[in-house]
Amino acid sequence: MRFVLFFTSCLLTFKCAFTEHCSSPYRRIGNGCFIIINDTVSGDAAFAKCLHRGDYLATFETLNEAMLMKYELLKMKTGVHYYIGGRNINRYTPGGDWRWIKQNGDMVKMTYFAFDKGEPNGSLSAPQDCMFFYAARKYSFHSVWCDHGGLVGGYICQRHV
C-alpha cells in the first residue's frame, strides 16, 4: 500500500512539475512549450526578444513537430506570418545550409525539407537567411530577410522544459 501511495504521489508531482513549466501564456504543442506573439519586428529582433524572455525562436527538429505547429496556426486563423528559429548559415552553398538555432547557440542541421515550392529563394545579393511560417501559403516554410520587420507580423518563442 505504501508503494502505491508513493508511486501515485510521484506521478502527480511529476505531472505538476511537467505542466508548471508550460503555463499560460505559453501553450504545450506536441512535446514543446511555445508562446505565439503578434508583433511586427524583424527576424533579428524576434530572436533577441525570445532570448530576453529566457526562450529561443521555435525550432522543429522533426516534421511531426512542424506539422503540429502548422495545424495550431491554421486553427488560430490570424493570417499572421511567424518567424521561427531556422537560419541559413552559409549563403555560398546552393540552397543554403539551414540550421535550427537553439537557446545556447547550438545549431542543429535540418533533417527534412519542408520549404514551399521555390523556397528558399535568397541569394548573395538578396539574402533571405531567416525562416518563417508564411500564412498566405497555409503556414509553409519560407525564407525571408532577417532585418525586415514590415512583412512578418509575429514570432514564436520556445521554452526549454
Image: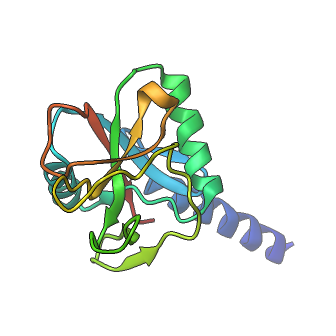
Query: Where is residue 107 drawn, in percent x and y?
Result: 37, 77
* Residue visible at 32% across and 66% down in the picture: 88
Task: Say whether residue 7 is left or right of residue 117.
Answer: right
Query: Where is residue 135 drawn, in percent x and y?
Result: 43, 29
Query: Where is residue 10 drawn, in percent x and y?
Result: 66, 69
Of residues 5 and 136, the one nearer the viewer is 136
Is residue 31 placed above or below 97 in the rendered structure?
Answer: above
Query: Where is residue 1 drawn, in percent x and y?
Result: 87, 72
Task: Say whether residue 63 is left or right of residue 119.
Answer: right
Quadrant in which residue 160 is drawn: bottom left
Is residue 137 placed above or below 28 in the rendered structure?
Answer: above
Quadrant in which residue 12 is drawn: bottom right
* Residue visible at 27% across and 36% down in the picture: 154
Is residue 133 placed above or below 50 in the rendered structure?
Answer: above
* Residue visible at 47% across and 19% down in the picture: 77
Of residues 94 and 144, the one nearer the viewer is 94
